Structure formats: structure tokens, C-alpha cells
Amino acid sequence: MNNLDLEQKNNRILYRELFLKANEDFKKQIIGLKTHKYCKNCGTCCKLRYTNLSPSEIYKLSQKEDKISSEYLRLFLPYGAEENFDYESNSFIDQNINNNLALKTNTNYASLIISKNTEPVYFYYCKNHEESSNCSVKKEESTLCSSFPDSVTTILPSKCGFRDWQKAALQKIQEEMSRDILIKIREIKEFRYSFDCKKTGTCCRLASSEFSYEELKEKAKNGDNFATQFISVFIPYDNIEDVKKIFPEYIDLVFLQLDEGEKAYFYHCPHVTDNNLCSRYEFRPQICRDFPDNPLSILPPVCGFKEWKDDVLVASMILHALIEILEFNIKKIEYALE
């Protein structure tokens, strides 16, 4: 394994760790917005609790000392269960019967959940719930009850007070969190100007894109600014062999990062001179002036901006992880609120 391969492997491991930590911190912030003042004691969550886990799957998890699954066994029964139902010895429940009985209990809410789930869904009810919506078990005695809803993306009935929590979370993500990320990204990009190009010519002779030259021309024709700038400078190589002669390790790394079915195309600038200078420097497009604008891109050790990349790598990975987390949750919350 060469140095570039090792660097990429270590970066993937680091990113995974940073992503998990960022997601944990994000959840803490969102849960921090939640208070039980939102609960209207309508009892719907007691009469109709949903999960993608079947009763047998819940039982198996409880045997692994999963706390939530153990709470299900203690407090909740699946719709369609017989009087002698037992999670351990007779946990099979017909999903269609389960769903139909839930629909009879609360047609609007149950149908909403079913329509928004792409996977099989099962409904449960609390065996301690009374018609008066009073609970014979104190909420603090059950994590399953006291923490409901434990996810800001939970699909809730239209009159549930915790929908206001979801709206507050959405506002915090879209306004406060997204603003903070943009500020930090701007700071990282500004820090780049503390470093200088060493004129290796690598970026001029090895530009890569997920799009072919024909696709880039079509995108430029449709008004894509980046594509327009790119094809105004770069031209494609005739074959991959010519590309590998320049920096074979770099080419291998690009292909290693591709997902199945993805392609990479390589280009070069005809205006770079033998001494790695630009023959039309004063007229170079913005994409050349700004390169590199992404510290997560592959940079060879000889690049003058490699030190910048190394300095801001962890911060950039965290921001990238947060962007993924925020985008995912925005879509999920908006979907739940529809």
C-alpha cells in the first residue's frame, strides 16, 4: 500500500468516526429542544405505536438486552394478538391482520403511517392504557413512554403537540445550524489564501470529472457556469494510458473512490507551459483561481495547498458530515410534517 492509498484509507476511517460523533451531537441538540409541555395527553401514542420490527424481531432484540425492546415486551401488545399471546413462545403476527386492526382503531393516523413507510410496519398498543387516556404506569418508569417520540422524524398524528417540536427543530436546522456551517466553510476557504501554489502543474495536467466532455458541453449549453468555465480551458485525454503516465497513483485513487457504475474522465489544460506556468494566467477562469476549493479532494504531496488540506481536514470532514446529517433530517422532518 503506497502513501496515498494509506492516507485515503485512514481518512475514510476518520470520517466514519467523525460522522458518528457529529450525529450524536446533533441528536443531543435536537432532543434539547423537546419538553413535555408539547404533550397534549391525547393517548394516541399509547393506543397506536408503530415500528418496522415484528414481534419476533422485538423479542430477539430483547434477548440481547436491548432496553427499548424489553419495554415493548413489558408494556405493549401487537394488534392481532390472541389472548394467550406470548412474545417468547408465540410471537408470530400476521402483518395484514395487524395493519387492518390498527386502521380500525385510528384510520387517518394508521393509513398515514402505512403510506409513508416503504418497509413493512407493525402496530402495537399499551396494555395498561385506559379509555380515559390515563395511564396506570408512570411515564418515568418506562423509557419507551417517557422519551416518546425519541426521534424528530417520527410520523405523528396531526393533533399531536410534538409536531411543534418538529417544527422548532426544523427551524433550528434551517436557520441556526445551516448558518453556522456556512460561516465555518467560509473561514476554511479564506484560510486557503495563507498558502501558495508551488507550480507543480499537476492540477493543470490532471483535472477529473464525473462527466464526459460531451456531457459537459451539454451542461454548458444549458447554462451551467462551472461546465462553461471547465470546457473553456480543459480538453479530454485521448486514452487512460496517457493519463497514467503523469501520476499513476493519483489515477488509481480516483477510481478507488468511485461507487459501482460511476465513471471518471480526465482532462488537461493546453495552456500550461513546460515549466508549469500558465500561458494565459491573467485570463484564467475562476475555477482555476479558486483551485483547490475543497480540502476533501485528493491533493498530491507536492501540492502547495496540501498543508492547508491537512490543517483543515478534520474540520472539513465534520462540516461535510453535518451537511449530510442536516440534509437528511430536513427531508425526513418535512416528510413527517406533510
Image (spheres, grey):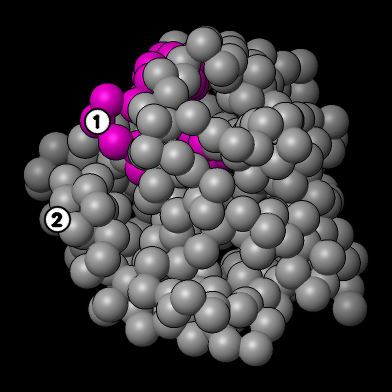
Neighbour class for label 2 at 10 Å: few (<14), some, many (≥20)? some
Residue 164: within the magenta? Answer: yes
Please identify the quadrant where the C terminus is shown.
Answer: top left
Q: Residues within 10 Å of mark 1 (few under 14, many from 20)?
A: few
The relative height of residue 337 versus residue 60 in the rendered view (above or below) is: above
Residue 218 got which mark? Answer: 2
Q: For this rendering, which residue is in front, 93 or 242?
A: 93
In the visual, does 287 lie left or right of 36? Answer: left
- Label 1 sits on a secondary structure element that is loop
Q: Amino acid at mark 2?
A: Glu
Depth check, mark 2 against mark 1: the one in front is: 1
Q: Are marks 2 and 1 in contact (CB under 8 Å)?
A: no
Give the image quarter of residue 265. Answer: bottom left
The magenta region covers 149-173
**Residue, x 65% and y 18% (percent of image)?**
32
- Which x, y percent locates residue 232? 29, 44
Q: Residue at x 16, y 46 (%)?
A: 108
What numbered label is drawn on residue 158? 1
Residue sitting at x 74%, y 47%: 20
- Between 76 and 270, the one lying in front of the other is 76
Foreground: 276 or 297?
A: 297
Q: Is residue 263 left or right of residue 102?
A: right
**Residue positioned 77% across, 23% down in the render:** 195
Query: Residue 37: x, y in percent?
Result: 51, 11
Left or right relative to 253: residue 4 = right
Q: Residue furthest left?
A: 222
